[in-house]
């Protein structure tokens, strides 16, 4: 008999609804979550939630007052970290979600609140920190370390032996080549090919990736 667990999704925008689609796929694969609804401090497009048969339970404070397992459907690293810190110690616990079409190899450690979306691959000897999200079709290769609250946009490829710091943003289709270190808080533009280390807080774009002109 399937075990059904209750779940609340934080954030009812596009990223939150994509989290819901991952949860629905898990249900089809045999792990059933009962999604109670969404919480959001500034909800919008409620008609899109209604088409899913769900609604807004309240603001984020609702979850603090009614602790449930939750998934952070927030696409911005800083906001994701801020909300996670706000909910820490309330009894609401972040869940780790892995889409059934994702591939997770041996000797992989995923921190709490990590979400791995459809068709993503994590190979072997990889460490990924809390509240990092790998969007659709991403890949992290052998012996790499990824920090906390990192945002992988769709189609990002991180090669082997890389280090990605906390709060990094990786734009759609970005490639980080073997052995590169990306410092905390850096931003990698869409389609960039990163051949050299990126300092903390820097923004790089292009092929090969270079600091963005001011």
Image: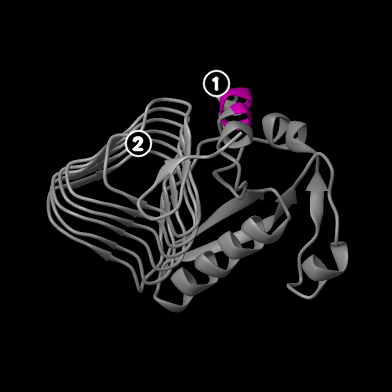
Q: Position of residue 168 (x, y in %)?
A: 45, 37
Q: Is residue 119 above or below residue 76?
A: below
Assess disc 2: are there few (<14), some (14-19) or many (≥20) residues with their C-alpha within 10 Å of its C-alpha: many
Taking the image as shown, residue 194 lies to the left or right of residue 50, namely left
The residue carrying mark 2 is: 129
Residue 167, numbered label: none
**Of callouts 2 and 1, the N-terminal one:** 1
- Judged by its main secondary structure, the magenta piece is helix
Q: Position of residue 19 (x, y in %)?
A: 57, 60
Q: Is residue 130 magenta?
A: no
The residue carrying mark 1 is: 89
Q: Position of residue 56 (x, y in %)?
A: 81, 53
Assess disc 1: are there few (<14), some (14-19) or many (≥20) residues with their C-alpha within 10 Å of its C-alpha: few
Q: Is residue 142 above or below residue 51?
A: above
Instruction: Write the residue at 68% across / 56% down.
Output: 36
State how far apart marks 2 and 1 are (Cα): 19 Å
Q: Which quadrant of the figure contains the N terminus?
A: bottom left
Q: Which residues are magenta?
A: 82-86
At mark 2, the secondary structure is: loop
Q: Residue 121: which quarter of the image?
A: bottom left
Instruction: Write the residue at 65% across / 63% down.
Output: 17
Instruction: Write the residue at 17% across / 42% down.
Output: 179
Q: Nearer the viewer, mark 2 or mark 1?
A: 2
Q: Is residue 84 magenta?
A: yes
Extreme-top residue of the structure: 89
Q: Position of residue 131 (x, y in %)?
A: 46, 39
At mark 1, the secondary structure is: loop
């Amino acid at each position: 008999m399937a075990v059904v667990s209750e779940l609340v999704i934080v954030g009812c925008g596009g990223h939150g609804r994509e989290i819901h689609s991952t949860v629905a796929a898990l249900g089809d694969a045999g792990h059933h979550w009962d999604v109670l609804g969404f919480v959001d401090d500034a909800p919008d497009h409620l008609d899109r939630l209604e088409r899913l048969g769900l609604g807004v339970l309240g603001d984020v404070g609702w979850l603090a007052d009614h602790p449930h397992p939750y998934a952070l459907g927030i696409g911005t690293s800083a906001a994701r970290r801020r909300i996670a810190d706000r909910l820490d110690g309330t009894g609401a616990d972040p869940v780790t979600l892995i889409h059934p079409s994702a591939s997770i190899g041996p000797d992989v450690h995923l921190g709490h609140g990590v979400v791995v979306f459809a068709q993503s691959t994590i190979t072997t000897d990889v460490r990924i920190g809390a509240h990092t999200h790998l969007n659709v079709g991403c890949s992290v290769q052998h012996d790499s370390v990824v920090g906390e609250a990192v945002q992988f946009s769709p189609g990002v490829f991180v090669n082997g032996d890389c280090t990605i710091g906390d709060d990094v943003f990786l734009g759609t289709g970005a490639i980080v080549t073997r052995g590169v270190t990306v410092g905390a808080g850096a931003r990698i533009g869409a389609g960039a090919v990163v051949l050299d280390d990126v300092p903390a807080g820097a923004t790089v774009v292009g092929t090969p990736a270079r600091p963005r002109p001011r």
